[in-house]
């Protein structure tokens, strides 16, 4: 014999047509109630009287209340669950109570059960407690945002999960129904996977992240199903201070004002700390064109014509600027700048003030770029990609590395290939 299939409609499936109509009527009455309105108590008394000798219908109503959720429903559950005394229906009541726990309501023992009262009273927290967490993997440039947010519309909590990778691209956007414990377990498991602490952040920052992802077109169509619902859920929590949360947190940590970073200093920092480069392709949408750009620059750098080194290097710079303009776009620069802002926030949350300050400088400069070909920083970004993917160094980049490391890699750094001029590439650039 085959296994008996569970009835997905629960106890409601055994109700008569008239009883189902009554159940629908009861639910409609409760939906019209204000959880703090004066009529709710009379409504619950009326329901209790109507169901006092109808345990099966009462159990069906308790089940429906737990599926609906909300403060009115949990108060009705408290008032009515004592009606059901039949042990065969007890499992339905316990399962309904479990659903309320998942929706953020807490159970508290309140003395022995009486014949007309419930042995368990559901208590909702005296005040709404929203939570928002962030875990960051700085190696892979991956950010996991998770929020546990109260929704006045459904009178229940919802869990929001947003995963963002390079370059400021949404890889997952989900709206889940979890208990608070389930939410915290999710945060811990995500942080363990990313090898990150769990950081507390304001809901308003997550709201801004989603606004910016949408504005920059960095959410794939397949991940945008719940976007409208999530943005509406977070809208009341937007930060009053319009400045990036990074700046607000920087001040709260007693760091004063973030010093202005000059472009040349940022170019030097990017050269010395390639870990802040987004991994793999750097997020560059036109990476396939990079190989052709490398060949053009190789022809300029190693041309057979006798040209003074000064003229050759100037031509190389001019061609690099043209190629940077062709490979990058202002839209990409805005996304890259926003990505670096989140990376800087991750460093600041870990109290790595030096990295946070410099990467935030990268973010400020990059998102203001309108012509990538006129930006030395964006040109250096392209030069780094050429080293990483093709082991090719422009003359300027090779000179910069010699200033940093000499002809040998820095102590503790792995040894990469040697260039034709004898420079050994630091392993951190190509690993």
Image (tube, rainbow, N blue to C red):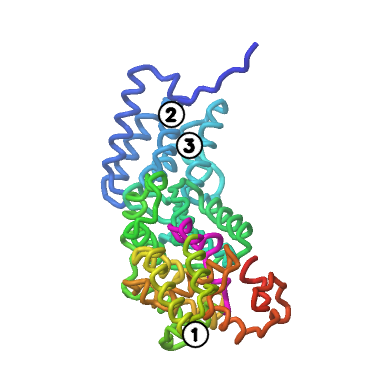
User: What residue do we see at 54% from left, 23% from top?
Assistant: 6
Task: Look at the image and say whether residue 153 sits in the magenta stretch.
Answer: no
Q: How many marks?
A: 3
Determine whether 18 is above or below 295 in the image: above
| Inter-mark Cα distance, 3 to 2 | 14 Å
Label 3 element class: helix
Mark with earlier residue (1, 3): 3
Q: Nearer the viewer, residue 231 or 101?
A: 231
The disc placed on residue 82 is 3
Span shown in magenta: 272-291
> In the shown orientation, is residue 261 left or right of residue 89?
left
Q: How crowded is mark 3: few (under 14 residues within 10 Å), some or many (20 or more)?
A: many
As drawn, which residue projects farthest toward the top?
Answer: 1
Label 1 element class: loop
Label 2 element class: helix
Query: Which residue corresponds to mark 2?
Result: 60
The disc placed on residue 308 is 1
Q: Where is residue 180 in the image (x, y as percent from the top left)?
A: 51, 53
């Amino acid at each position: 014999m085959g296994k008996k299939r569970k009835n997905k409609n629960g106890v409601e499936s055994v109700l008569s047509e008239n009883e189902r109509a009554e159940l629908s009527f009861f639910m409609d009455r409760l939906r019209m109630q204000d959880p703090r309105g004066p009529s709710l108590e009379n409504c619950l008394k009326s329901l209790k009287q109507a169901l006092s000798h109808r345990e099966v219908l009462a159990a069906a109503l308790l089940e429906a209340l737990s599926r609906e959720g909300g403060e009115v429903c949990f108060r009705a559950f408290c008032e009515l669950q004592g009606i059901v005394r039949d042990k065969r229906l007890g499992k339905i009541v316990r399962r309904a109570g479990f659903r309320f726990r998942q929706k953020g309501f807490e159970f508290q023992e309140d003395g022995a059960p009486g014949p007309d009262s419930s042995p368990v009273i559901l208590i909702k927290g005296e005040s709404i407690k929203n939570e928002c967490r962030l875990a960051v993997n700085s190696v892979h440039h991956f950010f996991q945002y998770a929020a546990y947010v109260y929704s006045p519309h459904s009178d229940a909590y919802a869990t929001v999960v947003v995963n963002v990778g390079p370059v400021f691209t949404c890889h997952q956007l989900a709206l889940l129904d979890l208990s608070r414990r389930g939410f915290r377990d999710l945060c811990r498991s995500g942080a363990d996977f990313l090898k990150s602490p769990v950081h507390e952040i304001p809901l308003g920052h997550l709201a801004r992240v989603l606004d910016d992802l949408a504005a920059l077109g960095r959410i794939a169509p397949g991940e945008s199903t719940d976007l409208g619902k999530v943005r509406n859920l977070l809208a009341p929590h937007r930060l009053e201070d319009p400045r990036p949360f990074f700046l607000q947190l920087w001040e709260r940590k007693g760091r004063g004002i973030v010093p202005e970073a000059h472009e040349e200093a940022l170019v030097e920092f990017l050269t010395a700390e390639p870990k802040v480069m987004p991994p793999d392709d750097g997020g560059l949408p036109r990476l396939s064109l990079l190989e052709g750009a490398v060949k053009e620059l190789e022809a300029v750098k190693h041309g057979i014509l006798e040209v003074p080194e000064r003229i050759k290097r100037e031509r190389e710079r001019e061609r690099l600027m043209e190629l940077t303009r062709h490979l990058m776009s202002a839209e990409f620069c805005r996304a890259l700048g926003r990505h670096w802002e989140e990376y800087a926030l991750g460093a600041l949350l870990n109290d790595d003030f030096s990295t946070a300050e410099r990467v935030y400088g990268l973010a400020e400069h990059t998102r203001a770029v309108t012509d990538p070909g006129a930006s030395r920083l964006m040109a250096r970004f392209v030069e780094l990609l050429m080293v990483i993917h093709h082991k090719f160094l422009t003359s300027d980049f090779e000179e910069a590395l010699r200033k940093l490391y000499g002809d040998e890699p820095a102590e503790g750094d792995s040894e990469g290939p040697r260039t034709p001029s004898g420079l050994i590439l630091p392993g951190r650039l190509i690993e």
